[in-house]
Amino acid sequence: MGTLIKVCSVADLPPGSMKGIEHEGKRILVVNLDGTIHAWDGTCTHEEYDLSMGFLTGDNVTCALHLSQFNLLTGEAVNPPAERPLGKHQVKVANGDIFVEVA
């Protein structure tokens, strides 16, 4: 088991929004998709660009650098040039706060 990092309160991440955090040099992207919180590696697998600087459309995030797109339900790269999926992080919601597990 990794370390739980507090991201923010649930109220600060409404449905359809995302937030990027950094922990010990690792970017993590936390998203609220229709009330369900997901956490993924926050760096594009194509050119190592910060995905929190991108665009959230439905269940996908688009990297602002070269427009690679990732499905935020599966982590899969769905639009090139990225080909590798994003790594997933476990999420815990407790007492109105969002926590992400990091290795």
Image: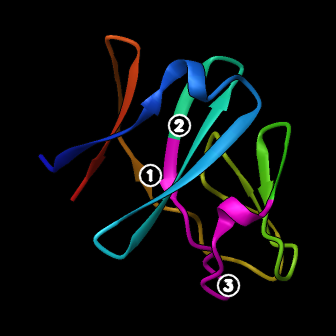
Q: Earlier in the sequence, mark 1 or mark 2?
A: 2
Q: x, y percentage for residue 46?
A: 67, 84
The label on residue 54 is none
Distance (Cα) linking label 1 and label 2: 8 Å
Residue 70 against residue 34 in the figure, above or below: below
Looking at the image, tell me whether mark 3 or mark 1 is earlier in sequence order.
3
For mark 3, what is the residue?
A: 46
Q: Are marks 2 and 3 in contact (CB under 8 Å)?
A: no
Apparent side of residue 37 relative to residue 63 in the rendered image (left or right): left
Instruction: Give yes or no for residue 12 being in the magenta stretch.
Output: no
Q: Amino acid at mark 1?
A: Lys
For mark 2, give the secondary structure: strand
Identity, as a three-letter code, of the amino acid under mark 2:
His
Residue 62 in percent (x, y) is at 82, 61
Marks 1 & 2, CB-CB < 8 Å contact = yes
Cα distance, mark 3 to mark 1?
Answer: 17 Å
> Crowdedness of circle 2 by 10 Å Cα count: few (<14), some, many (20+)?
many
Q: Is residue 2 left or right of residue 42?
A: left
Which segment did they paint magenta?
39-54
Could you tell me residue 100's position as x and y percent? 34, 41
Residue at position x 51%, y 21% in the image:
10
Instruction: Indicate the quadrant where residue 95 lies.
Output: top left
Label located before the other in sequence (2 or 3)? 2
